[in-house]
């Protein structure tokens, strides 16, 4: 049985719509249906392209109310897929930029092999950025996000990527779990890992290399240097990493 794929879409300028259009034939070959959670700004500004997606029965869209946050958009899409999946059907929770990169790069064959194996696996699979994948990212990205894995290992006994990019689980497992997610920001990613931690298999993969240079058509080394030298990139990441560290501490205090 082909799995489902689900991701949020926040794309005011239309760039990700173009990438999505490019990979749609491949998505249709490897997935039964794509569930997309549309942000309010995307619905407002990209109305024509949203309507084009709606006209294709392969896509199932849900729309999010104004003032909702990014975590709400993730969870709404996940719930839509989990509620509509068939018994025993796997659901791939991911982001469109990472998938677009994997399918349009030299990582394509390994990506397809890995998602097939995860689809057929009896336990949920969390894909991790491998050492090689992390080396392609700006160093400040790694240093800040790695704090979550280090603190999680100290407090919970095992290192996870709490800012994950691709998780595969059966819809029947996700359906009762998702209502237990309480936050509205990116802490929802860590919450899902905490709820699944006893059942998760983890797999480091190279295809989770840094996707932004491909997505934005930039020179990788120059773009990487720009991000490493930009203090706003540190502030941006600390703003979502520090709340997750507090979440991990709160969880450890309750255990």
Image (cartoon, grey):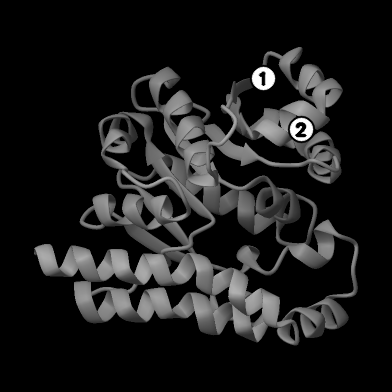
Instruction: For mark 1, give the secondary structure.
Output: loop
In the picture shown, does residue 254 fall above or below 183?
below
Crowd rating for badge 2 (residues with CA inside 10 Å; few <14, some 14–19, many 20+): some
Crowd rating for badge 1 (residues with CA inside 10 Å; few <14, some 14–19, many 20+): some
Q: Looking at the image, do the residues carrying marks 1 and 2 touch, with CB atoms under 8 Å apart?
A: yes
Q: Nearer the viewer, residue 171 or 187?
A: 187
Q: Nearer the viewer, residue 124 or 222?
A: 222
Instruction: For mark 2, give the secondary structure.
Output: helix
Q: Quadrant of residue 235?
A: bottom right
In the picture shown, does residue 211 fall above or below 171?
below
Residue 225, position as x, y percentages in the image: 80, 85
Q: Which image quarter is the C terminus in?
A: bottom left
Q: Quadrant of residue 106?
A: bottom right
Please give left or right for residue 12 compared with residue 86 in the image. Answer: right
Q: Which residue is mark 2?
A: 24
Residue at image coords 54%, 47%: 115
């Amino acid at each position: 049985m082909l799995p489902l794929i689900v991701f949020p879409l926040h794309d005011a300028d239309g760039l990700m719509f173009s990438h999505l259009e490019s990979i749609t034939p491949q998505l249709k070959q490897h997935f039964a249906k794509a569930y997309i959670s549309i942000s309010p700004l995307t619905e407002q500004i990209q109305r024509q392209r949203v309507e084009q997606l709606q006209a294709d029965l392969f896509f199932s869209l849900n729309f999010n109310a104004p003032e909702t946050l990014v975590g709400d958009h993730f969870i709404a899409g996940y719930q839509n897929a989990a509620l509509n999946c068939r018994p025993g059907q796997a659901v791939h929770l991911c982001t469109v930029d990472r998938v677009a990169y994997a399918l349009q790069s030299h990582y394509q064959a390994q990506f397809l092999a890995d998602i097939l194996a995860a689809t057929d696996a009896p336990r949920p699979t969390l894909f991790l950025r491998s050492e090689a994948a992390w080396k392609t990212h700006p160093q400040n990205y790694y240093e800040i996000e790695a704090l979550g894995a280090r603190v999680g290992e100290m407090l919970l006994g095992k290192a996870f990527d709490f800012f994950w990019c691709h998780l595969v689980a059966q819809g029947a497992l996700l359906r009762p779990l998702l209502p237990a997610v309480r936050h509205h920001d990116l802490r929802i990613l860590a919450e899902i890992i905490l709820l699944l931690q006893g059942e998760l298999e983890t797999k480091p993969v190279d295809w989770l290399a840094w996707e932004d240079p491909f997505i934005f058509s930039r020179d990788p080394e120059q773009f990487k240097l720009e991000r490493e030298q930009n203090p706003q990139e540190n502030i941006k990441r600390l703003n979502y990493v520090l709340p997750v560290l507090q979440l991990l501490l709160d969880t450890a205090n309750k255990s």
